[in-house]
Amino acid sequence: MGMNNTPAGERTHIGFFGRRNAGKSSVVNAVTGQELAVVSDVKGTTTDPVYKTMELLPLGPVMIIDTPGFDDEGALGELRVKKTKQVLNKTDIAVLVVDSSEGLKECDKELIELFKAKEINYIVVHNKSDLLEEIPAADAQEIYVSALKKEGIFELKERIAALKEAGSEKRIIGDKLKSGDFVVLVVPIDSAAPKGRLILPQQQTIRDILDAGAIAIVTRESELAETLEGLGKKPAMVITDSQVFKTVAPLVPKDIILTSFSILFARHKGLLDVAAPGAAAVEHLKGGDTVLIAEGCTHHRQCDDIGTVKIPRWLRQYSGKDIRIETCSGTEFPEDLTKYAMVVHCGGCMLNEREVRYRTKCAVDQGVPITNYGTFIAYVNGILKRSLEVFPEILEQLEN
């Protein structure tokens, strides 16, 4: 997968924050070498977070986020500040831009406290250093630059790269495979499948299998029995789309590991250790309870859409109760989850790991069980434990 095609959810998200007119957009443009953001002498030109995917050396594929001024006033300003806080939930590295002639103000200190509270690695960039008579000594988390004169920008990029957490390159399934392993992928081609292509989690899984030196064999569920019979070699595992789990499970011999794309992505995004026990919350639902179905992206709804049709149907069928359903999609994930008996989240392929972890933490902190589509589907079909055999540490936690 080329750098330009790296999915947004797999990119390092770098957020630029600060007061109005501290020169955030100028610093963004200097770091990226592109005019990504509007630069003006008028305070508060950036009104919405600006997102731009790009290749930034020495980091690689990144998502640059330029945010509105954090010191905005009035009703519109409050909305901007709320949006800035939402951006923090998906920020891997925070860059706080300060006007070096004015120093840190109260709202800058407030931002630093937010970075610390959300455990985000950050750097404070004192911009407009060309206006200073003498540049003060900076500590390990500070740097003086001039976006206007491009001074200190190379070092800033090196410092940002150093903030990327070591070991953050997580595998989808490659760490569980050996070179030469056969892996059978079951991909249903139904009305919800995108015409002429595979969905993102399927593409990413195939790529990770190939990176491990293993062999990916892709089939529909209708050809699975024939595929397994004709292989001539026992596959290391079968990975299926969750929606056909029930059809696939009886066709796969018990001595072959069976799991789903959704379960792999729950682990990849850091949700599986909570999602596995969270699925059991369906056992305790009562009539009139409200369940939140959350999706990370907005997409065209199909007539038999998984989030708005299938999951609600399975929730009601399994529990036998009249369950109320609420949905949210895109960035609009509610901070207060206390009204919900349970949260069922999508696979999160369009969200980065930090945002998935943030949403998970929101639920855990408020005592609300959270699971994801694939884990929930496996549970209600009675095959969750089997689908977790590939991750014995999670299975052991579930059984204890």
Image: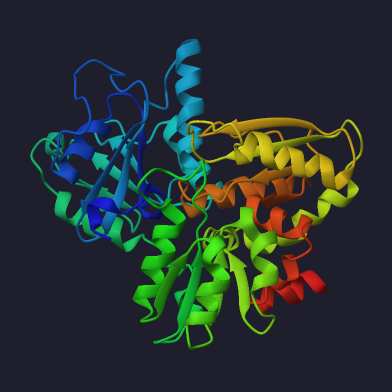
* Quarter location, residue 286: top right
**How has the structure been colored for display?**
rainbow
Q: What residue appears at the point 50 percent right and 11 percent down from the top-left corner?
A: 75
On the question of residue 106 being in view, the answer is no
* Quarter location, residue 43: top left
On the question of residue 163 being in view, the answer is yes
The vertical placement of 150 against 55, above or below, is above
Q: What residue appears at the point 21 percent right and 61 percent down from the top-left corner?
A: 58
Nearest the camera: 187 or 39?
187
Residue 24: x and y in percent read 27, 33
- Taking the image as shown, residue 355 lies to the left or right of residue 393, namely left
Residue lying farthest left?
149
Residue lying farthest top?
74
The vertical placement of 278 against 87, above or below, is below
Residue 187: x and y in percent read 50, 58
Which quadrant of the rendered structure holds the C terminus?
bottom right
- Taking the image as shown, residue 210 lies to the left or right of residue 225, namely left
Nearest the camera: 208 or 192?
192
Nearest the camera: 234 or 171?
234
Residue 29: x and y in percent read 18, 37
Nearest the camera: 27 or 3?
3
- Taking the image as shown, residue 63 lies to the left or right of residue 322, namely left
Residue 246: x and y in percent read 70, 60
Q: What residue appears at the point 74 percent right and 66 percent down from the top-left corner?
A: 383
Q: What residue appears at the point 48 percent right and 88 percent down from the top-left corner?
A: 232
The vertical placement of 290 against 347, above or below, is above
